[in-house]
Amino acid sequence: MKKFASIGFSATMMALLLSACGSNSSTISTTTPASSSENKPAATAAATAKVEKPVTISFMHFKSDVTDGVAKIVEQFEKQNPNIKVEVQPVKYDDYYTLLKTKIASGDIVDVFTLNAGSNTKLLHDGGYLEDLTGKDFMSNFDPGVLKAQATDGKNYIMPVNATPIAVFYNKKIFSDLGLQVPRTYDAMIAAAKKIKEAGKTPFALGWKDNWTLAMWLSRDLPSNTVLVDKQVDFFSKVEKGTAKFADNPASKTVIAHAQELFDLGNKDQLGVDYNGVVDLFSKGDVGMMYMGTWPLADIQKKNPELYKTGMGYFPYPFSNDESLNKLEFNPDASLAVNSKSANKEAALKFLAFMASKEGGDAWVKNINSLSFVKGASTDIAPAVNDLKPYFDKGLTYDSQSYITTTIDWTNQFTQYVQKVFFKKATPDQIIKDLDDWVAKNHK
């Protein structure tokens, strides 16, 4: 694999990129990591002090798709801290927040857990369950712009760990055999998919049995079309206030139409195939495209080394027909929080200090195949990711999640309603009305 650094992926661009990807405002921090001699975060007291008595901390995370990778990172930590044992609890993302909230409500203490910035962090912070990490030594290993973007009420209760592009993997041989170019617009992508189908191949690998895989796409296509195409920059704020409805938003129908087209051009039984199944399907080399973050790369490397090395590429998902709008989606993935009720807080903070070190950041890159927010961490991910270098170099990235300025969990409901359209059990107008009715009923 080639490192971004070896092909000109500058430290300055990484700082700009990472601060931009997590930002919820139009301001982008220009803080740049220091020179190479200063770019290796110094070991903090929390990272080096010994825990005298053996202790076990629990770590619950939603990265169940890369359970083995997370286990290797934890093993690395335990070798350096022989008196600390980490009990790892991987949970599927679809079930994660329900289980986490249930545990917390019942007094079942989880010492460290993954958390996304936004409504869930706000909820747990307001309940008094999150340790304040503001000003901790290890937090200096992150760009200030990233910390500001993930702050709640001006303070940091979560620590950023990794980030990933969300884009489209494609099979180079299928594209080459059919004379297809990498699509830069939505219509061009659908046209390419139709040619792949005409050739007897599967255009899109879709594993929508897992609710999050469909929700991941919907929750990016809708805000992108809402804000960037239809210019409704304050739509989600108005939904929060009860002054706008999804029926008022042209992007609602656009996204449902997009979803139907993908469904019609996908593999058989999309709603019966889960995340692992769709990665298996794409790895076999008979599918044209797969919309996903970088998470499947380690599995693809194991299952089809040749496809991984030279047979696949990666392009930004073109949500619109205006090529200038179709930048690279780049989002924060997992962040870490410490339970303020933990009886093992010292060990838990030591665990975060390791994750915030260059060694910890490199471990995430190596074992999870995602970029790390830690200053100076490796950018050596996979050959296909090098296709995105022009977007990184030119700053052509954006975070659609920053447009969703509402705490209303519309994504889960919308995902369920859209499936009715696939099977002709409801019309687009009906499910949009149902979504508005659900919002009005549950968020007065």
Image (cartoon, rainbow, N blue to C red):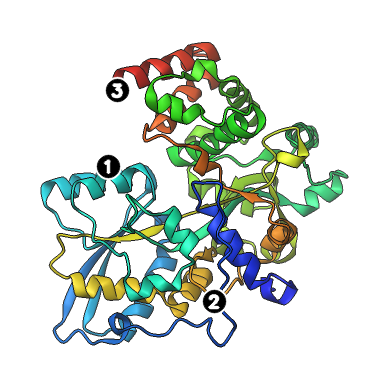
Question: Residue 238 in the image: x percent, y percent?
Answer: 45, 25
Reading the image, the residue beneath label 3 is: 442
Question: Residue 94 in the image: x percent, y percent?
Answer: 37, 42
Question: Residue 404 in the image: x percent, y percent?
Answer: 48, 37
> As displayed, is residue 183 above or below residue 134?
above
Reading the image, the residue beneath label 2 is: 376
Reading the image, the residue beneath label 1 is: 98
Give the crowd class for mark 2: few <14, some 14-19, many >=20 residues within 10 Å: many
Q: Quadrant of residue 56?
A: bottom left
The amino acid beneath tag 1 is Thr
The answer, for residue 156, to whether it is visible in the render is yes
The answer, for residue 1, to whether it is visible in the render is no
Viewport quadrant of the N terminus: bottom right
Could you tell me which residue is drawn at 55 percent across and 60 percent down?
Answer: 29
Give the crowd class for mark 3: few <14, some 14-19, many >=20 residues within 10 Å: few
Q: CA distance from mark 1 to mark 2?
A: 35 Å
Q: CA distance from mark 3 to mark 2?
A: 45 Å
Which of 42 and 73 lies nearest the eye of the viewer?
A: 42
Closer to the observer: label 3 or label 1?
Answer: 3
Earlier in the chain: of badge 3 and badge 2, it is 2
Earlier in the chain: of badge 3 and badge 1, it is 1
